[in-house]
């Protein structure tokens, strides 16, 4: 629909031009397709079982006790800010002040949006690893920035960052690097050496870094190292995480930012006019979740590790080329060895009909659509029997 208000000759699109290139997010489209066709949904990344019962009960208790039912403080409830600080200290040896260096947000999504809106001027360039999580492109656009993708390239069963390409992408207009490790959708976890070089470049070129570490606890056989731990990075890094992935409550939308007081103040300036605050009672529950013993985090990791292996092996047996992830709960595959279409979009649109499974075409995470075309992502944050059934169905593709 268009409206010609103000200009009789030139009908004007309703949607702001910054958002014109972004249709409905692929996650909504594919989850709707799964519901419509009754398919197994390995598309949108959400667990099919809720997180710990005691944490759900903590949320109920907070609601009943009247904690968080009215606007919580703009930075988040003190219990959660303290829990975030203790988590960063215990896990990574990073010290933050709960009053000035932590900001609670409506999921990582709002943290990303508020950080970009706060830190970018129109025309600033933002380097983002491609394929990139879909909200990055939209939020860079809303902030008037220009995205500059640097591709992670598939080779020998995993995706790699070329540090020379990253270095070459930096220009005098580069304001910040938007990093994501563990990386959605490829499952790449940046190594200590890669992060050290990124840190060195950021310091040398005086860049800010926003680092999205929502999958920080979902790593298999490798270590997640926060960028903020590297020399010179503590003061120039906005670190983002979220309770959605770690505690399997994606609907609660409780995320957080840790950064220097100056960066937190800047991000809060934008955040206060987006939601101001959110999820009051859930903030108390997430504070308890962050304080769970190591056994919880180890158990989650072990469970997802087994599911990663189940789905990766199953997909390989079904004929896909599999990029076995080191982190996240997603497996990227190449559909070309199956011998049919090499277009991931077409493949994903047909998959429910062909075998009752839904997946995500990685091309949506690329500016360079051709580079992403043959790749398709499957989520493994589902019950074991669901994954087994999905694998059985996908194996039928070869014979169908
Ligand atoms: N960043 C990445 C890389 C993600 O995969 C997601 C998906 N949940 C988010 C951010 C958004 O997190 P939240 O649900 O906490 O907003
Ligand atoms: N992060 C989830 C994924 O990558 C989806 C989140 C969303 O639906 N926006 O699948």
Image (tube, helix red, strand yellow):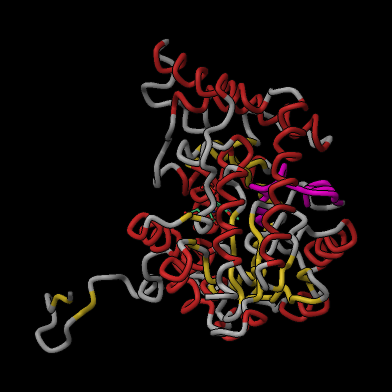
Please tell me which residue lies in front, 195 or 201.
195
Q: Is 282 left, or right, of 256 in this rendering? A: left
Residue drawn 54% across the image and 61% down it: 393
- Up the image or down, 224 lies above or below 176; here it is above
Residue sitting at the far left: 8
Q: Is 315 left, or right, of 362 in this rendering? A: right
Q: Quadrant of residue 280?
A: top left
- Up the image or down, 109 lies above or below 165; here it is above
What is the x, y in percent for residue 94?
80, 37
Please tell me which residue lies in front, 141 or 206.
141
Asked if residue 209 shows in the view, the reply is no
- Up the image or down, 166 lies above or below 385; here it is below
Residue drawn 43% across the image and 57% down it: 39
Is residue 221 shown in magenta?
Answer: yes
Is residue 182 shown in magenta?
Answer: no
What is the x, y in percent for residue 379?
59, 55
- In which quadrant will I find the N terminus? bottom left
What is the x, y in percent for residue 38?
38, 55
What is the x, y in percent for residue 68?
43, 21
Please tell me which residue lies in front, 14 or 180.
180
Residue sitting at the far front: 399
Residue sitting at the far bottom: 9
Residue sitting at the far right: 193
Residue drawn 53% across the image and 36% down it: 49
Identify the magenta region. Answer: 209-230
Residue drawn 67% across the image and 73% down it: 319
**Dominant SS type (magenta):** loop
Asked if residue 322 shows in the view, the reply is yes
Q: Quadrant of residue 259?
A: top right
Q: Quadrant of residue 246?
A: top right
Q: How many numbered circles are shown?
A: 0
């Amino acid at each position: 629909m268009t409206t010609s208000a103000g200009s009789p000759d030139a009908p004007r699109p309703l949607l702001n031009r910054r958002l014109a290139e972004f249709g409905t997010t692929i996650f909504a489209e594919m989850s709707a397709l799964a519901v419509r066709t009754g398919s197994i949904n390995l598309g949108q990344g959400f667990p099919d079982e809720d997180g710990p019962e005691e944490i759900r009960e903590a949320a109920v208790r907070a609601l009943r006790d009247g904690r968080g039912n009215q606007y919580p403080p703009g930075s988040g409830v003190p219990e959660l800010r303290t829990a975030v600080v203790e988590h960063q200290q215990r896990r990574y040896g990073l010290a933050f002040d709960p009053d000035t260096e932590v900001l609670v947000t409506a999921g990582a999504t709002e943290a990303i949006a508020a950080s970009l809106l706060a830190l970018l001027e129109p025309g600033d360039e933002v380097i983002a690893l491609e394929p990139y999580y879909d909200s990055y492109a939209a939020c860079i656009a809303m902030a008037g920035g220009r995205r500059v993708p640097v591709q992670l390239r598939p080779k020998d069963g995993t995706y790699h960052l070329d540090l020379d390409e990253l270095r070459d992408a930096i220009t005098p207009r580069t304001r910040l690097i938007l990093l994501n490790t563990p990386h959605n959708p490829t499952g790449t976890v940046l190594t200590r050496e890669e992060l050290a070089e990124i840190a060195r470049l950021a310091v040398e070129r005086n860049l800010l870094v926003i680092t999205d570490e929502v999958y920080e606890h979902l790593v298999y056989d490798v270590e997640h190292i926060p960028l903020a731990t590297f020399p010179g990075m503590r003061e120039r890094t906005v670190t983002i995480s979220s309770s959605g992935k770690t505690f399997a409550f994606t609907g609660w939308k409780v995320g957080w930012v840790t950064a220097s007081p100056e960066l937190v103040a800047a991000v809060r300036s934008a955040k206060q006019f987006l939601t101001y605050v959110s999820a009051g009672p859930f903030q108390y529950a997430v504070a308890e979740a962050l304080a769970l013993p190591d056994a919880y985090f180890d158990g989650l990791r072990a469970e997802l590790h087994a599911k990663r292996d189940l789905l990766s092996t199953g997909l390989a047996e079904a004929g896909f080329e599999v990029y076995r992830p080191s982190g996240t709960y997603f497996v990227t595959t190449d559909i070309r060895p199956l011998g049919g279409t090499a277009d991931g979009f077409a493949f994903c649109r047909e998959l429910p009909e062909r075998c009752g499974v839904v997946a995500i075409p990685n091309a949506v995470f690329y500016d360079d659509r051709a580079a992403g075309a043959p790749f398709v992502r499957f989520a493994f944050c589902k019950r074991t029997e669901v994954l087994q059934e999905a694998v059985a169905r996908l194996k039928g593709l070869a014979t169908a």
